[in-house]
Structures are given as structure tokens and as C-alpha cells.
């Protein structure tokens, strides 16, 4: 299993640099892109000495290598035209994005998963139809429409929540609701499908024939076996919540990564664009890695399969 974890972790490295390369090539082709600060770090270091030895030209390839070198060796993501560090700007904004995304994720999970279980247990009955209709309705509402409705009700009509900014806890309410509504509909629908699939297994009929109460079958057998698909649901919702902040932050003037990325696109600032991509790519890959690892730990069948593959590899090596 440790070998599987290490293999999965090592596969993230080429994936990350492939994403970074694509983002670099796309942003470097933009007209008016700011690229003057690309070689602002590490002048006179080992990489510059290597460039001098091979007489490397000053082109996109050498600048991209310089950016990767500074990122990996120095932990830097470049400077802006005003000589401020990208990593400092991103670190300041990341806490707001993380706060909104985590709260939206928790709302989605804590409401959506129980609703999905309720719908699956009451399949083809009124709770199932109600939850399915409600989830479909929420999923069909565009984010910007929901934002306008919330602002009209809570800010203009009732006057209890601020229109923009998150200076107090009240500023988090509407952004979290917008993120939570989208994730909640996704969580309820995917949870319903996962639980329904397990409820159709033949061994549950045997358990009922033995006289086990329905609540015990649900909590001890159905939900236990639904952990792996529910972890996949949670991972998808976490990624969706993070990506949705790119839209929500601009509506509510939240000083997070989403607003930072949009402003970088408007200003054609390659340094800020790449800094945002680096952070978002690492977070999304981290979410996928944690989800996969938890799925392996919670799935005896998967652990058994990995153990068999490991024994086959070790046996082949011995032979």
C-alpha cells in the first residue's frame, strides 16, 4: 500500500508541471502580457551560470525553466510590476478563498448527503420525489441568478446582510449559501445513486431475512459500504466549491484567489496568472490525492487488490 501511495504521489509531479507548462504557453501568447519580471529571481545563481556556459537564448523555454527553477528551489512565484512578491499576495488572499470554500463544502456535505440517503431509502416514494425535484431545481439555477435573488432579499429588502465584503461573519453568509446550494444538489443526487446501488445488492435481502432491523442494515451495512463512493462525492464537491469561488468572489467582492485570478486576466499579468494557477493546481491535486488515499484505506477490496499486485511485483523481481 505504501508503494501505491508513493506511486500516486510521484505521478502528481509531472501532472503539475504539465499544467504549469500549458498555463505558461497560453499566457505567454497573450498580447500585452507582462513578462518582464520572469527572470527577476536568482540572477547570478547556478541556473544563470549554466545558461552562460551553454549560451542559452532568452526565449520562452529558458524563461519557463527559470520560473520552474525559482518555484522549486527558491519557493518563489515571481514579482509583479510593482516589485511585490506573488507568493505574499497569494498567501494573503488564500485565507479568504479557503474560508468561503470550506464553509460552502461543509454546508453541501452536511445537508446534501443526508438528503441523498433519505431519497434512496424512500425510493419511488414522496421523500424521493421531493428531494429529487428540489435537487434538480437547485442545480438548474445559475449562480448569478441566485446571487441576485439573495442580494435582493437579504440586503435590499431585509437589510440584514452586506452586499459585498467579508469584514464580519455576515459577509460570509451569502457566498457560502451560493456555494452550498450548488454542492448540495450535487451531493444529494450522487449520494442517492450510490446508496441505491448498494441497496440493490442481494446480501441485504439475506440480512432482512435474518430479522435485522432496517435501521441497523442502513447504518451498519449500507452506509459502511457507501463510504468509498461518498468520499468520491466529497472530493468532487470540494473541487467544485473551490472552482465556484472564482465566480462568487467577484460577485461579492471577496479578496480571494478567484478575484485575484480574474483581475490578473484583465490586466494580462502573467506573473499573477501563473501564481494563481500554481496554487489552484496544487490544491486540486491535493484534494484528489487525499480522496484517493482515503478511498484505498476504507476499501478492503482495493487494499487486497493492491496487496496482490505488490506481491506479484516482488515475486517477479525475485525471479
Image (tube, rainbow, N blue to C red):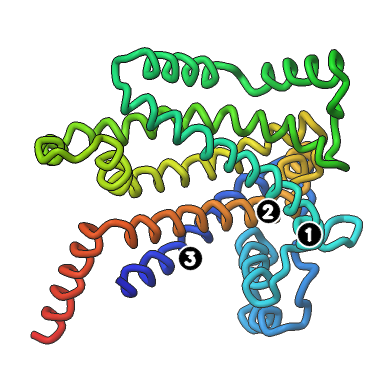
- Name the residue beneath numbered marker 1: 86
Q: Nearer the viewer, residue 19 or 199?
A: 199
Whole-percent x, y for residue 113 in the image: 45, 36
Q: Name the residue under label 3.
A: 13
Q: Quadrant of residue 261?
A: top right
Q: Is residue 156 left or right of residue 318?
A: right
Asked whether 225 or 64 is in front, the reply is 225
Mark 3 to mark 1 CA distance (whole Å): 22 Å
| x then y, percent, for residue 159 | 88, 20
Residue at image point 69% right, 81% down? 52
Find numbered disc 1 in the image and state the secondary structure of the residue it sits on: helix
The quarter of the image holding the N terminus is bottom left
The disc at residue 274 is 2
Residue extending farthest right: 82
Sequence-earlier tag: 3 or 1: 3
Q: Earlier in the sequence, mark 3 or mark 2?
A: 3
> In the drawing, what numbered circle is on residue 113?
none
Rendered view: 76 above or below 170: below
Direction from residue 171 to residue 185 in the image, left or right? left
The 10 Å Cα crowd at callout 1, few under 14, some 14 to 19, many 20 or more, is many
Could one spot residue 268 in this view of the protein?
A: no
Q: Earlier in the sequence, mark 2 or mark 1?
A: 1
Amino acid at each position: 500500500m505504501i508503494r501505491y501511495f508513493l506511486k500516486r504521489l510521484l505521478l502528481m509531479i509531472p501532472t503539475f508541471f504539465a499544467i504549469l507548462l500549458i498555463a505558461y504557453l497560453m499566457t505567454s501568447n497573450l498580447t500585452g502580457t507582462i513578462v518582464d519580471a520572469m527572470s527577476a529571481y536568482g540572477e547570478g545563481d547556478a541556473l544563470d551560470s549554466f545558461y552562460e556556459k551553454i549560451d542559452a537564448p532568452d526565449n520562452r523555454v529558458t524563461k519557463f525553466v527559470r520560473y520552474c527553477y525559482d518555484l522549486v528551489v527558491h519557493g518563489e512565484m515571481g514579482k509583479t510590476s510593482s516589485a511585490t512578491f506573488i507568493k505574499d499576495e497569494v498567501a494573503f488572499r488564500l485565507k479568504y478563498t479557503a474560508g468561503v470554500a470550506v464553509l460552502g463544502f461543509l454546508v453541501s456535505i452536511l445537508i446534501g448527503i443526508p438528503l441523498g440517503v433519505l431519497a434512496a431509502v424512500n425510493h419511488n416514494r414522496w421523500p424521493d420525489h421531493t428531494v429529487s425535484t428540489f435537487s434538480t431545481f437547485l442545480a438548474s439555477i445559475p449562480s448569478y441568478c441566485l446571487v441576485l435573488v439573495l442580494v435582493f432579499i437579504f440586503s435590499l429588502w431585509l437589510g440584514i446582510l452586506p452586499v459585498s465584503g467579508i469584514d464580519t461573519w455576515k459577509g460570509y453568509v451569502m457566498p457560502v449559501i451560493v456555494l452550498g446550494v450548488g454542492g448540495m444538489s450535487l451531493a444529494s443526487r450522487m449520494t442517492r445513486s450510490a446508496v441505491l446501488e448498494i441497496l440493490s445488492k442481494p446480501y441485504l435481502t439475506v440480512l432482512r431475512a435474518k430479522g435485522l432491523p432496517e435501521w441497523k442494515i442502513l447504518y451498519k451495512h449500507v452506509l459502511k459500504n457507501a463510504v468509498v463512493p461518498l468520499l468520491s462525492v466529497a472530493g468532487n464537491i470540494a473541487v467544485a466549491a473551490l472552482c465556484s469561488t472564482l465566480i462568487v468572489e467577484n460577485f461579492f467582492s471577496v479578496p480571494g484567489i478567484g478575484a485575484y485570478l480574474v483581475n490578473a486576466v484583465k490586466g494580462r499579468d502573467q506573473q499573477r496568472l501563473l501564481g494563481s494557477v500554481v496554487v489552484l493546481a496544487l490544491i486540486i491535486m491535493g484534494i484528489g490525492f487525499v480522496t484517493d488515499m482515503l478511498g484505498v484505506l476504507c476499501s478492503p477490496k482495493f487494499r487486497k487488490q493492491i496487496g496482490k499486485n505488490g506481491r506479484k511485483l516482488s515475486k517477479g523481481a525475485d525471479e
